[in-house]
């Protein structure tokens, strides 16, 4: 499994030749100016909720790649209205196998509306299950007891969690989340992009070390092998 970071909460995860792109927000991101989105060609685009900082480049990337947009019904209906032909509507609690990967939509505690203010359904996270490793992409969320269920009934090898505080959980709650998820390996996201979510990365690393957990922060454009 290869995970490439494109800034904010955007990652491309390649599993056995199938590419899943999460929450594309690249061209408006000042920190991701060196990323050329015309080179990004996923098979699926997974959108956690309707906020601009999670779907700004979804339409452009879906159109150039022919990727299928996956999300709650309201998200895929919006994508169709933007002229995207291939969508797969789902909703919280549902699973669907794409290639060799089972994608499950799981609850996120957040809000969700489109940039024009219209209703975007419930925000979600995604659990990706394969025959070897499982990963959890939380989307934007608070610490929630839902994570306890996820950890109890799934072996999670990597948790992609928002760590920037203010709009989502921050480091203290993220460390609690690792306990609930029973996963000690966190890939951080949703930090530093805007002044509201600037974090002290040294302090974050220290807090994780003290708790005996691993916090991975990738450079934008960097790839992690799992
Ligand atoms: Ni949001
Ligand atoms: Mn966000």
Image (spheres, rainbow, N blue to C red):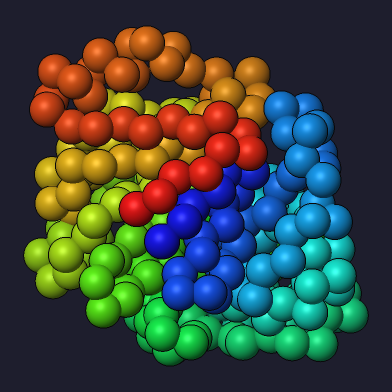
Q: Is residue 46 left or right of residue 91?
A: right
Q: Is residue 189 above or below residue 164?
A: below
Q: Is residue 172 above or below residue 155?
A: above
Give the residue at x 34% y 53%: 226
User: Does the image show residue 67?
Assistant: yes
Q: Whole-percent x and y of residue 155?
A: 16, 65
Quadrant containing the N terminus is bottom left
Q: Whole-percent x and y of residue 147?
A: 23, 57
Q: Is residue 107 left or right of residue 48?
A: left
Give the residue at x 37% y 11%: 202
Q: Whole-percent x and y of residue 31?
A: 71, 27
Residue nearer the viewer, 182 or 82: 182
User: Does the image show residue 7?
Assistant: no
Residue 211 placement: quadrant: top left
Q: Is residue 76 above or below residue 22?
A: below
Q: Whole-percent x and y of residue 8?
A: 60, 39
**Residue at the right extreme, as displayed:** 83
Residue nearer the viewer, 60 or 165: 60
Give the residue at x 45% y 69%: 15
Q: Is residue 218 left or right of residue 146?
A: right
Q: Is residue 79 left or right of residue 126?
A: right
Give the residue at x 85% y 73%: 63
The number of numbered discs placed on residues in the rendered structure image is 0
Residue nearer the viewer, 217 or 225: 225
């Amino acid at each position: 499994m290869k995970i490439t970071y494109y800034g904010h909460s955007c990652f491309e995860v390649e599993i056995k030749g199938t590419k899943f792109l999460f929450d594309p927000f690249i061209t408006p991101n000042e920190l991701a100016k060196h990323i050329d989105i015309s080179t990004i060609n996923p098979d699926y685009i997974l959108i956690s909720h309707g906020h601009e900082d999670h779907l700004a480049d979804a339409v452009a990337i879906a159109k150039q790649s022919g990727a299928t947009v996956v999300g709650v019904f309201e998200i895929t209906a919006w994508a169709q209205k933007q002229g995207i032909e291939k969508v797969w509507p789902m909703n919280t609690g549902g699973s669907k196998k794409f290639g060799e990967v089972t994608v499950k939509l799981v609850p996120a505690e957040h809000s969700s509306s489109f940039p024009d203010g219209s209703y975007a359904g419930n925000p979600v996270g995604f659990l990706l299950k394969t025959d070897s490793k499982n990963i959890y992409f939380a989307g934007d969320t608070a610490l929630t007891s839902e994570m306890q269920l996820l950890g109890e009934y799934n072996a999670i090898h990597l948790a992609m969690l928002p760590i920037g505080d203010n709009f989502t959980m921050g480091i203290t709650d993220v460390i609690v989340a690792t306990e609930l998820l029973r996963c000690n390996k966190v890939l951080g996201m949703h930090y530093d992009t805007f002044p509201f979510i600037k974090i002290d990365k040294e302090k974050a690393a220290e807090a994780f070390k003290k708790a005996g957990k691993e916090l991975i922060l990738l450079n934008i454009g960097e790839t992690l092998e799992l």
